[in-house]
Amino acid sequence: MTELGLAEAYKKVRQASIDICQPLKAEDYVVQPSVDVSPPKWHLGHSTWFFETFILKPHARHYREFHHAYNYVFNSYYETVGARVIRTDRGNLSRPTVEDVYRYRSYVDSAMADFLKDDPEPEVKELLVLGLNHEQQHQELLCTDIKYILGHNPLFPAYGINPTEKVIEKEAAGVVHIPAGIYEIGFNGDGFCFDNELGRHKVYLHEFKISKNLVANREYLEFVEDGGYRDFRYWHAEGWDWVNSKGISAPLYWYNMNGKWMHYTLSGLQEIPPAEPVCHISYYEAAAYAAWKGVRLPTEAEWEIAADHFKWGKRWEWTNSAYLPYPGYKRAAGAVGEYNGKFMVNQMVLRGASVATPAGHSRKSYRNFFHPQHQWQFTGIRLAE
Amino acid sequence: MTELGLAEAYKKVRQASIDICQPLKAEDYVVQPSVDVSPPKWHLGHSTWFFETFILKPHARHYREFHHAYNYVFNSYYETVGARVIRTDRGNLSRPTVEDVYRYRSYVDSAMADFLKDDPEPEVKELLVLGLNHEQQHQELLCTDIKYILGHNPLFPAYGINPTEKVIEKEAAGVVHIPAGIYEIGFNGDGFCFDNELGRHKVYLHEFKISKNLVANREYLEFVEDGGYRDFRYWHAEGWDWVNSKGISAPLYWYNMNGKWMHYTLSGLQEIPPAEPVCHISYYEAAAYAAWKGVRLPTEAEWEIAADHFKWGKRWEWTNSAYLPYPGYKRAAGAVGEYNGKFMVNQMVLRGASVATPAGHSRKSYRNFFHPQHQWQFTGIRLAE
Amino acid sequence: MTELGLAEAYKKVRQASIDICQPLKAEDYVVQPSVDVSPPKWHLGHSTWFFETFILKPHARHYREFHHAYNYVFNSYYETVGARVIRTDRGNLSRPTVEDVYRYRSYVDSAMADFLKDDPEPEVKELLVLGLNHEQQHQELLCTDIKYILGHNPLFPAYGINPTEKVIEKEAAGVVHIPAGIYEIGFNGDGFCFDNELGRHKVYLHEFKISKNLVANREYLEFVEDGGYRDFRYWHAEGWDWVNSKGISAPLYWYNMNGKWMHYTLSGLQEIPPAEPVCHISYYEAAAYAAWKGVRLPTEAEWEIAADHFKWGKRWEWTNSAYLPYPGYKRAAGAVGEYNGKFMVNQMVLRGASVATPAGHSRKSYRNFFHPQHQWQFTGIRLAE
Amino acid sequence: MTELGLAEAYKKVRQASIDICQPLKAEDYVVQPSVDVSPPKWHLGHSTWFFETFILKPHARHYREFHHAYNYVFNSYYETVGARVIRTDRGNLSRPTVEDVYRYRSYVDSAMADFLKDDPEPEVKELLVLGLNHEQQHQELLCTDIKYILGHNPLFPAYGINPTEKVIEKEAAGVVHIPAGIYEIGFNGDGFCFDNELGRHKVYLHEFKISKNLVANREYLEFVEDGGYRDFRYWHAEGWDWVNSKGISAPLYWYNMNGKWMHYTLSGLQEIPPAEPVCHISYYEAAAYAAWKGVRLPTEAEWEIAADHFKWGKRWEWTNSAYLPYPGYKRAAGAVGEYNGKFMVNQMVLRGASVATPAGHSRKSYRNFFHPQHQWQFTGIRLAE
């Protein structure tokens, strides 16, 4: 991107966060109904804090911090940058208000606009691009967290007039066959990527087959109705404990109302569309479904090699790969180096993208990751064998 | 009261709740930073729900429920009236919004105004008076919960321009001597009282002395600085566990900042005024302070008998009496019968009233009660021996 | 008692603890299946530690401590005497072995026998008598803890050949009427009593009636079968939470096996005898039963005044009195002063005695106390109104 | 093995479990000081239960179960075979006694000896071999659990006269270089292996270096003294939480006593030998140490390919590989199929063997696995880059 391009890109990405929040009431910005969910106003403040902390404070002459306490309030996991708020406490803070947060955004955006009039150093540009990608990640979380907040309210309010979660595409048939051999995976291009996608490297894959389509609600319902949630044989031991201790018996947002299966969507409660891909399932559920079918989930390398042969991008797809460093992985220096490497334990890789992923923020080599029990992202199942 | 009087009283009490919330931002109405604190919008909804549920629905012809889900959302501990929300979850609900709650209040108030144009049956009037006293109790909780919400925010926002928590009175000196004998305690009058104040009954009291004044911050600070919080000898075993597991070393809202003792007040952080009564202490702290002084707390009977001899009403005063039924106590029939009796275990009685108690809502026989670890009410210490 | 008498009393009381443990296997001495239960070997060591710590170490010339680490292992709640083991951890200690503990007892008993040959100072004699009463309290706990350990084992082993928990007495009929008036309660004699029974003082009692008999299993079963455990109206709010969170539906040790009510006894699983007093109930259950009957539990003062008019001594009886200091209560100085006063919050008083209470260790003024949820003592119900 | 061989092998393996327990007191067999540790008598019973359940009951004519309740008591994670005891409860069971468990072993061993006189079917032989390997795994756990039980006792008792945990070998110097290429890993032979080692398959490895020696106590101490446990930069986010919430500041069993580093060994408390490999560290600690050195842990494939070039077998070595199925992994049918696959999430692979691994139970392809926070196995660090 040129400098002009960067300033434009900055405005566009920053505006997108505000657009996502436009249908919300002030109260919706505040609550945190689960430890994994953050209040929308926190997302708005935290993504702003990134630019203030890593670009404006160290690089913009004469910049004056908006508020000394915001570093404490909007920091997240960057241990390098001072004490952080315990994550479960985010939902207890009524101040700064939503209006304060928007003023914080305007203040920082205005300072950034001034700052970008001059030609920043290359490493600052890099930080800026990282900051924009960081904000796009939080845009996806804004969507999933807003869905969680509204979908766990007994009034089941709709998010807005016409949001779509639908994956409108004709179901593809059949499977892709990939022969054994040495392949290369990892980022390969000259745009932005996260450090965890580097460096591109060889892997040996055995012959495998992978479905062209995602598992549909109709198919998943067969598993549910066959008693899949009550038969330990399909589950990891920790998945079985999760099912039983949490009383899980269906994907998140599914409700059996008077014998009819409904689910909460951003448009409110609706009947479950049978042909749409199943969504909001944990890794445990994805793996149990695959075990029930007698097949398995693909590894992330298999997925990446086969990805040109099927449509993807509307649902994150659980793989059977743990989130671990690629050969030769190097953590970036400084605070931004905490971005990825520190999470490389106890999480599983998801590949693809979802309806909530900002346009331009997905690529074949993207490595998303969540803990195996998490359901609140837009997650689906592709089978392999 | 006459019927006109009731309608007027209703308007006045209902307006007082709104007045208390006037300085709040929408976000302040939503959060629940502790399991014991409720979001202000819940208090506003719950006190409204009382009138809708116990008066309008059963007694007002043609009344139509405002919203079918509000019974679920704004119910509290009345097990008789349907499923209740788990209390810790109140802070997760962004909807109904603050505006919705105010519309709910207007709707119910309007229906109540119509309803009160006719002469209600005596038992309905009784319920109305109970409802108003119930709302006044929640007005006090609104004050203490708002203080908790703002006082646990890292920005320490002030509640408003000129709120007062001060107990502006010249310190009285000396003690009251009460001789041994048979006395009578319990409600004695023809206005309203709660069922737990009935029936008036005889008690035998041994001779005792009781202070005319409450313990001042200056005096309590001596206890703090003498290491009182680090010496188990002054504490109940469960109090000592509480001190250690929670890391308690001073009253709630006290902060030692660079060697100076400050406390959070509704006007923001301020220096602790030495002559003011100590406030926001638990029963454990009150009892430990008394033990350190070599004296004790009064029983509730002693307090009630001596109360005409000292000033009271600006601080709830911990007694050494457990909250138990008076001789001949009878629980009221129906849902309102759950009001008091079910709490008569594991709580201690407080007598008096506080700066947050609505005018006209205090009397000598009033029995307030909280668990021994609670600090967030406006609580103080009066010594006896 | 004379000195000879004291030495004899010492031997007799100390032997009684060993007799209680005689039917146990080594493994039974070690486990702690609940935080409220202590391993039998801990009881044996702790009661020995009392004599070593408070008598031999300070008063017996040339006495050498048995093992320096035992003070840490066998201390309990005496904060004055060094760090204590976290109570929940007692069940994790395989060493000292049972044999070690018996050697510790022999060593201390031998030193005590030598020590008592001389005439100890009066205050040492007092400590000795306290120590013997302390050991008798632990003898009762030994019985109830052993029952808990064996009764929570899936093999339901019997404790011994002919232990008796039965209260073999013809059911008395009717009630005692006590007129209103000033009465005196508290210890009145010249033998031993605990500090919490002092000083004797006046109370005013209103007229009341109290049952001559305890509630029988047959009667309690009616409550169970009437759905008493599923109707919140009979329960304290905290009792109702306890019932639901713990899934309580009957007294401890009761099992409904193929439609027949059985209970675990020290002789193994047996049918529940209908005419025997109900046993192993919590205060919450006692109070709920009384509420279901439309009556109440007596206060401890009522119990003490009426006690000469009925038989008691085979079951601890829950009263409706919280455990609080008597007027003029003074904590003893030094470590033994922690004995009682520090527990005077959140517990309820029980009066009487049980089949597990050592002979000579019961009296009318005895104030036993437990938390309201505890079921594992031999506890029963006497009704009043 | 021939049938004679099998009967001999059976006797030998079974005797080894008894030999390990020989120095124990009865009390040591009973306790469970951590949820991850099982009481020794449980290990002895559980490994016996395996033979009774999978061989004798289904295959030995006329076999009569030893005790109907033992299936419940000694079952572990085999969900197929009836209800299991909650794992945390194992330490609450005083019965069956140690003597009972030894009688159970004798009874089953005697039935097995009879059974093996005839020529069992091949699939029964397979089960027998699996059962013996299963018992050997529990022999290793017996050692580590006994160390935990004794090492967490304030008396720090020694396990026996001359147990050795020492890895007496001259430190090797230098590193092994392995060139990039396609390699094969997985079990390759005709003896026994677990299903998780199958099938042998190709992997592509990039060029790497791996140390010939394990990290020594001396080297690890530098990390400790450089503040490694107080600098979040070296830790996974979950590792950092673990360090802080558990207060970890050194390997398990390390104590800094008056400035000197000691550790608990099976011979009691001793000075830490500087040249010995560091032991009892978690994956988090191993990874943090590697990060501090600027290198990394090997993957399990790297380890297996390089293993012929260095000495191993005295310490389990953490790898940076998550425990996941090999390509083409198939779970065995029936209850024994639960053996491995269900644990393939959230655990890390360890390679090698330890001083506690039974002779003949280690091989290059063996995949051991534990959660990343576990320290109580004999675990060490080998570095790679």
Image (cartoon, coloured by chain):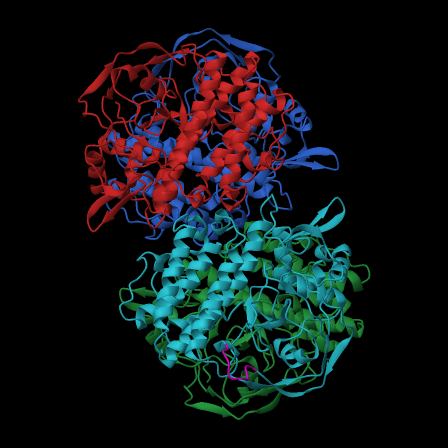
Chain colours: A cyan, B red, C blue, D green
Residue B11 % position (x, y): 46, 23
Relative placement, left or right, of B330 versus D55 is left
Placement of B187 over or under B150, stated as above or below: above
- Tell me where residue B360 appears, x and y as whole percent: 37, 20
Q: Which residues are magenta?
A: A186-193
**Residue C134 placement: quadrant:** top left
**Residue D9 percent location from the top left of the image:** 67, 74
The residue drawn where x is 34% and y is 76% is A118
Q: Is residue D354 above or below residue C143?
A: below
Decide which of B362, A113 is in the foreground and name it.
Answer: A113
Majority SS type along the magenta span = loop
The C terminus of chain A - image quarter: bottom right
**Quarter location, residue C360:** top left
Above or below, D205 relative to C282: below
Q: Give the percent coordinates (x, y) of residue D304.
A: 57, 84
Q: Nearer the viewer, residue A195 or A323?
A: A195
* Residue at 57 percent of width and 24 percent of height: B54
In the picture shown, does residue A371 fall above or below C82?
A: below
In the displayed structure image, the side of residue D177 where residue A152 appears, left or right: right
Q: Residue at x 32, y 31 (%)?
A: B379
Say if residue D49 shows up in the picture: yes
Is residue D111 at least partly visible in the picture? no
